[in-house]
Amino acid sequence: MAQLKRKNSAAFYDVDGTLIRINIVHAFAFYAMRQASLWDSIRVTTQTAASVPLFWAADKVSRKWFNELFYRYYEGFSEDRLIILSEELFEEVILPNIYPRARDLIAESRRAGVRQVLVSGALDFTMRPLARYLEVDDVIANRLEFKDGYATGKLAKPFIGGATKPVLLRDYAKKHGIDLAESWAYSDSYSDLTMLAVVGRPTACNPDRRLRAVARSYDWPVLDLS
Amino acid sequence: MRAIRPRTRARDREQIVTIDTDSAPRILFYGENFLLEDLPVGTRVIYPRRPMTGVANRQAAIRYALNHPEDMPPLHALLEPGMVVTIAVDDISLPLPPMARPDIRQTVLEIVCEMLADHGVDDVHIIVATSLHRRMHDHEIRRMVGDKVWNEYWPDRLYNHDACDPDGMVVLGRTRHGEIVETNKRAADSDLVIYVNINLVPMDGGHKSVGVGLCGYESLKAHHTPKAIVDSNSFMDPTASALSHSVDRIGRVCDEHMKVFHIETVLNNRMFSGPLDFLMKNEDDFTESDRLKYHAIKWTLDRTPRPLRREIFMRTPAAYELIACYAGATEPTHAKTLDKSYEQYAVEVEGQADILISGVPYISPYNVNSKALNPLLVQVMALGYFYHMYRKRPLLRDGGVLIITHPCSDHFDPVHHPSYIEFFNRLLPETRDSYTLEKKYQDEFAYNPSYVEMYRRGNAYHGTHPFYMWYWGQRGREKVGRVIVVGADNTTVPEILGWETAETLAEAIAMGRSTAGRSAQITMQHHPPILITDVIG
């Protein structure tokens, strides 16, 4: 089949809830349960489980607060261990939770010559195996700060999430010669409204109630990838 | 409504009524409601022909056609154990409104599937030939094919065609005019394709069944163009339609590569029955019961919210009856179908009209079970379908005035028509020129990944479908002098479509007369049900 090839377009995908069913807490729980010693695994897992209500409350107030709080729990994790575990995380947790139609959507977009980019508040090493599997061109994700091979519990700048996503999209577009008016953004969450609003072709994927209402108001396409 | 004396008219002239001083007011469709309007004395009202009598035993008529096909051996003689067979069926765009159960496709499929099983043919797939239309919902397919076929074939061997499946489509070649012939791979790889058609109007069936029903975008692109539309004198007369000629060329290439056995069914025009049967009558002949039904329905509709009104209409199936079934090779089968179709629909009319009045109903081929007849579909009903309901010469003279009645609300169904919304709000305000839209934007919409996904896995029309709707009206736009819409509930939609507005039909007629003259010939097409005019003189 013939195909229109777009040269200056990109498709930006939020990941958690949009392309996969799980979120960054699942990923952290996976890492927490696989500490170097059994005692550490029990300690970190228990600590994480006890903090879930706090994470939930922080996320309701601000995605930025949530991330700052959440990533502190990574303090002391070894970098090379996290990278090795991220491959296991992908195979055991992420792969079975990729929405069935997500890969088709990306394949269709790639056939149209559109540059494929994952934009996620999750950590870059967690996203890399997924990016490889989905054959996307780039990943914009949060990075942990490491000192002497161990995580400090802080995020390297720029922080990615909520209101900062459109800024990063603009920077990315400028760097790669992308026309945002001719680009797509896909997200499931109202918290990504700013990212959706910055492109010419916003699309709600498996949207939450607030985003669905916005999508209907602005006549954005609504996809169900599940 | 005034009580009107019953009249006796010659049966061969009963389709044409001239309004006089004591004529009854006429009922016009107004979306999901009706208007009751007094027409000026001298106005000509054209009614459809009476429904032809349905065959007494439709199973017998279908079996007879399968055993006595045109230019092909009988179906049973084509079957061998172990062969691969694909059955393609027309989608929900036909008939309108959907017919009462059992759908004629169900009857045909039950007979054909039984015959296939009796001959040891097990590798059978049934594909709903949607072309670039929306995928039918599961419940719609079940209603269409019936429980027996559904239980046996769904979902692995009964499914919607997918024109955007890169692994499911194959290019068979090109026509001598260079048109790409791309079709469904399963059908192309089959030893036999059986196409089950419903012929509602003469533009259905024939080579269009396989050539369009199972095609891909690049193939459809060859003939769904503004130029092909403008070069088609009438869509309802295939001999004078560039669109049909192109489809025929594509269909012939399909026939060279595939063995296709067509089963074409012709329905009468019994579109309304029961509480709506007054819509099948001349208002001058209304009985007290008809008047009561009309006023009761009108009273109810006036007090019912629009979504509920739609639901009421959509849940009222038509009482269509089978009037003929033909089978066999594409062209000889379709020739017989066309003859029967014209017998039901063609109405002879003397002379063209200067002003043509049409009521636009709630339904079109592209919004069955949708939340609205959106503005683009109102446009296609007016300038695409109703203007084109003729053979040879248009009923409305070139430069004439077309008056339609519809609220033209700014309502779209975001599930079925997502790309329509962008087309209407982003492209049309920029230009109404079909040629520019085709060149500049059509491929952009065709390969928009979101629209492709919504077409393939959701229930959306293909991203390019609104373009075809707009092209469909191109010839009408070029030939008609003015379009005036009566009763629009806003000014934005008519303005974007390039139409004028009037509060009442009387005002619209006065506006029309200001250009067509005081002695303008005014004609009202009293449809639906469907009618096709043959203008003589």
Image (tube, coloured by chain):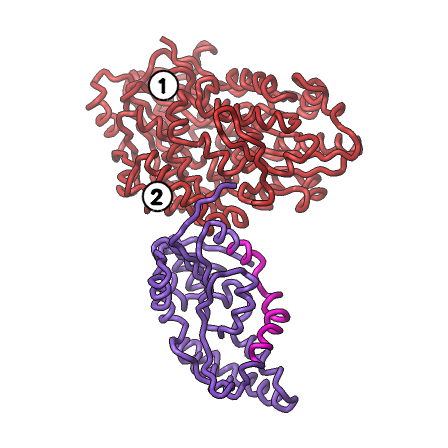
Chain colours: A purple, B red
Q: Residue B13: where, in percent of width, then height?
A: 43, 11
* Residue B317 appears in the rendering: yes
- As drawn, the label of residue B424 is 2
Chain hosting mark 1: B
Q: Quadrant of the C terminus of chain B?
A: top left
| Residue at x 49% of width, y 48% of height | B452
Question: How far, Cα to Cα, is label 1 from label 2?
Answer: 29 Å
Query: Residue at image x 28%, y 31%?
Result: B484
Magenta highlight range: A82-106
Q: Is residue A43 magenta?
A: no
Q: Within 10 angstroms of label 1, few (less than 14), some, or many (20 or more) residues?
A: many
Q: Which residue in the structure is indicated by mark 1?
A: B395
Which is more toward the observer, B451 or B338?
B451
Residue A212 picture location, percent across and down: 43, 60
Percent position of residue B115, x then y: 75, 30
Q: Chain of mark 2?
A: B
Q: Residue furthest bottom?
A: A39
- Write the residue at 64% across / 27% down: B260
**Residue at horizontal 37%, vertical 56%?**
A217
Kind of residue sitting beneath label 2: Phe
